[in-house]
């Protein structure tokens, strides 16, 4: 159920009226709620980032609104966590007759990237890419000191390409800037895809070629850079992971994020042996700020991949000591009304909101992993209780968002395009949280796992299942077809939402054919679900046609699902 309208926060246009302390206090409230959810277990030492997901008690102290949790002596063991992506839905019994056999997230033999000429390293070109990187990537992952980056850009423009780590870093910044596409400011009412004009296609092709040229420079220096014990080495590995995500290569991205986490941990052991990773009030160095941002960017990048892929757990950073549950605020200087200062402040608030959402998604991932294959009536009641509790926490996260990130919660299936990229992403996080908390109840219905149980459970189970379908529709309705760091997740989300909707359609049709009374018939399936899926696929057509990341295989799955929904049964692949 959607939160009551009288509980909704009203938007505020006055950004300066919201202080960092107020926002951090709200997020800390969410932190305490998430921590209080986990049942007691045996304990062992772990990082505050992990403790956020599973610790049954609050941090020992909170000072300066920075959520310093300090070293914790008794924390939970790592729980077994199962991915909640496309493959997990295909494991439902309803899809047993026609599960695809090929890998849906990678190619067995990826093609050779080929050789490329040296890129243009003139100052105008480098300055253009620097500006594009800041606008499209840095605001969401502030892992670079922009002053240092500009000095390195100038050095490469003046002296050319050498074999230093600095040159590797500049090449990776340019490779990422060239391959990413800016978030569109406007899209027509009937389409969520960008207009495919000859000029746009030519521009994208040229930028992709330029990205490959800079990547060719970077990859030849990445081995040397990764051998250095420096912040720049960690930045290089993290940027390499981000570049691979743009390329729809999640396994390569995970390799480099894992290496970045290892490099970060190694650097923290040698440069901060006593855990001095908190900025002091009189400190003028930006190194600690960058180290904090790197920690959280690497951590949440791995968490996001773990939602979809069967990766080993825990990651290196889950066991690394880190004294903060959230990064400290950036140094905003003495002119708070300066446009650059306002944008940095806005970026930081977005970063905090993203991290808080990631903690909740991790908790949901663990909670859904604990659902038995064939739950008993008692376990179904526990699932309902946990889901209700998580819905409260999700709404608390929504309520803690700064007013500048306000968005309405739709009551139906329609969703309008939002011109602000940060609000677009945070709204999508909310939809994902609501969909994940409800998805297990769809399986209960389509696989007939609660038929025959106490009828008093039926209304609650079907209500959650119907909510899941609503948020699948909303996520499909805000697919925007541009290449960005999360493009692979968009493809996976489109497929997962399609499968979830199709599972209910198939189960309801089977019940009709058997003239049986089953609770799945009480799940509300929107009539326009096929059209919404087709629109989402069309909006993301260029990426869906690629072989990288299993994209083209997923397109076949979606196509077969749509076909089988009209002429059942048809094999998925």
Image: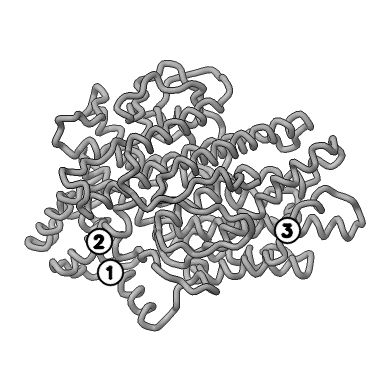
As drawn, the label of residue 210 is: 1
Query: Real-space Cα distance between discs 1 and 2?
Result: 9 Å
Colour mapping used in the image: one colour
> Is 45 rendered above or below residue 193?
above
Look at mark 3 in the image and give the residue it sits on: 525
- The residue at 54%/35% (across/down) is 363
> Is residue 74 found left or right of 344 in the rendered image?
right
Of 409 and 229, the residue lying toward us: 409
- The residue at 31%/33% (across/down) is 265
**Sequence-wise first label, 3 or 1:** 1
User: What secondary structure is marked by label 1?
Assistant: helix
Q: Label 2 crowding class (10 Å Cα cut-off): few <14, some 14-19, many 20+?
A: many
User: What secondary structure is marked by label 3?
Assistant: loop
Q: What is the x, y in percent for residue 296?
A: 36, 39
**Sequence-wise first label, 3 or 2:** 2
Between disc 3 and disc 1, the foreground one is 3
Look at mark 2 in the image and give the residue it sits on: 174
């Amino acid at each position: 159920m959607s939160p009551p309208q009288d509980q909704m926060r009203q938007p505020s246009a006055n950004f300066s009226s919201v202080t960092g302390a107020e926002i951090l206090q709200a997020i800390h409230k969410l932190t305490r709620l998430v921590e209080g959810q986990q049942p007691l277990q045996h304990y062992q030492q772990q990082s505050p980032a992990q403790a956020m997901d599973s610790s049954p008690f609050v941090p020992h102290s909170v000072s300066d609104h920075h959520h310093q949790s300090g070293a914790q002596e008794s924390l939970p063991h790592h729980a077994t966590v199962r991915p909640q992506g496309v493959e997990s839905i295909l494991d439902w019994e309803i899809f047993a007759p026609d599960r695809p056999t090929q890998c849906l997230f990678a190619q067995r033999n990826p093609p050779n990237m080929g050789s490329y000429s040296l890129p243009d390293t003139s100052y105008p070109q480098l300055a253009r890419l620097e500006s594009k990187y800041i606008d499209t990537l840095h605001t969401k992952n502030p892992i670079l000191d922009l002053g240092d980056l500009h000095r390195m850009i100038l050095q490469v423009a003046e002296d050319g390409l050498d074999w230093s780590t600095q040159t590797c870093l500049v090449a990776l910044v340019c490779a990422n800037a060239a391959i990413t596409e800016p978030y569109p400011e406007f899209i027509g009412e009937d389409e969520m895809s960008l207009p495919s004009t000859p000029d746009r296609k030519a521009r994208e092709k040229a930028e992709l070629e330029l990205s490959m040229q800079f990547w060719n420079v970077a990859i030849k220096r990445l081995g040397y850079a990764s051998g250095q014990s420096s912040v720049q080495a960690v930045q290089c590995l993290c940027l390499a992971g981000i570049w691979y995500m743009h390329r729809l290569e999640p396994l390569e991205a995970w390799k480099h994020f894992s290496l970045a986490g290892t490099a970060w941990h190694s650097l923290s052991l040698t440069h901060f042996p006593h855990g001095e990773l908190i900025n002091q009030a009189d400190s003028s160095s930006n190194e600690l700020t960058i180290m904090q941002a790197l920690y959280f960017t690497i951590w949440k990048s791995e968490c996001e991949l773990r939602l979809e892929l069967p990766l080993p757990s825990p990651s290196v950073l889950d066991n690394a000591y880190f004294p903060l549950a959230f990064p400290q605020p950036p140094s905003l200087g003495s002119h708070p009304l300066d446009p650059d200062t306002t944008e940095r402040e806005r970026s930081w608030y977005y970063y905090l909101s993203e991290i808080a959402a990631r903690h909740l998604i991790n908790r949901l991932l663990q909670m859904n992993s604990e659902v038995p294959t064939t739950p008993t009536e008692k376990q179904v009641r526990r699932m309902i209780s946990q889901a209700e509790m998580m819905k409260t926490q999700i709404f608390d996260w929504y309520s803690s968002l700064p007013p500048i990130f306000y968005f309405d919660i739709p009551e139906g299936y329609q969703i309008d395009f939002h011109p602000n990229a940060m609000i677009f992403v945070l709204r999508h996080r909310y939809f994902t949280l609501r969909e994940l908390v409800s998805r297990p109840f769809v399986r209960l219905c389509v696989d007939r796992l609660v038929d025959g149980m106490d009828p008093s459970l039926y209304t609650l189970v079907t209500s959650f299942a119907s909510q899941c379908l609503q948020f699948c529709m909303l996520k499909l309705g805000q697919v925007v077809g541009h290449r960005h760091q999360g493009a692979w997740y968009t493809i996976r989300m489109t497929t997962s939402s399609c499968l979830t909707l199709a599972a209910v359609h198939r189960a309801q049709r089977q019940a009709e054919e058997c003239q049986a009374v089953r609770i799945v018939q009480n799940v509300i399936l929107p009539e326009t679900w096929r059209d919404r899926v087709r629109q989402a696929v069309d909006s993301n057509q260029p990426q869906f046609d690629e072989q990288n990341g299993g994209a083209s295989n997923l397109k076949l799955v979606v196509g077969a699902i749509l076909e089988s929904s009209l002429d059942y049964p048809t094999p998925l692949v």
